[in-house]
Amino acid sequence: MKRFLPFIFILLLSCACNRDSYLGAFESNDAIRLEQKGKVICEYEPTTYQLSFNREKGEFRVHTDNMSDFFVAILDQVPTEQDQQVNGTLIWTTETDTYTKRDITLKAVKLEGDKIWLWLSQGQIGLVVKVLE
């Protein structure tokens, strides 16, 4: 068993380092979107998508005109500073299904102008939303 300890340690260390391996690439892109593990699930396109924001409800929406593709983030508060954590619900569609994650904690990893980059480590989900005011 002792001879395997160095290998186990290296394996655990590499897993810990890769935990948020997609975060850097996520932060470097300023497109309004939802992505998971580096794959874009839904991205705002001005000619076919609409944006919606409600500060009182802490709600951000990105959707097509017919709502066939969308993501919605409902937060307990709108983040105002980097590294702030907010609780909420995330709902989104894929080509085949609709997903909901409730009672999640998102971290505001970047704020720039009217855009907020939110990160959910569990599932490596990132979303960029826009405050419309």
Image (spheres, rainbow, N blue to C red):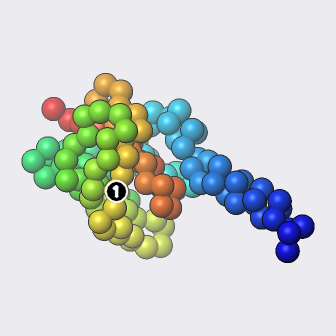
Residue 112 vs residue 17, the one in the foreground:
17
Residue 51 vs residue 122, the one in the foreground:
122
Numbered disc 1: secondary structure? strand
Estimate the x, y position of residue 114 in percent, counting from the top left.
28, 30
Q: Within the image, what quadrant is residue 74 found in?
A: bottom left
| Residue located at (14% from left, 44% from top) | 55
Rendered position, 14 above or below 30? below
Estimate the x, y position of residue 11 in percent, counting from the top left.
75, 60
Residue 48 vs residue 54, the one in the foreground:
54
Estimate the x, y position of residue 132 in percent, counting from the top left.
20, 35
The reply to whether residue 132 is visible in this rendering is: yes
Q: Residue furthest front?
A: 2
What's the amino acid at mark 1? Thr
Rendered position, 109 above or below 92? above
Q: Determine which residue is flagged by label 1.
A: 105
Q: Within the image, what quadrant is residue 91 found in?
A: bottom left
| Residue located at (41% from left, 39% from top) | 109
| Residue located at (70% from left, 60% from top) | 12
Q: Within the image, what quadrant is residue 117 found in?
A: top left
In which quadrant will I find the N terminus?
bottom right
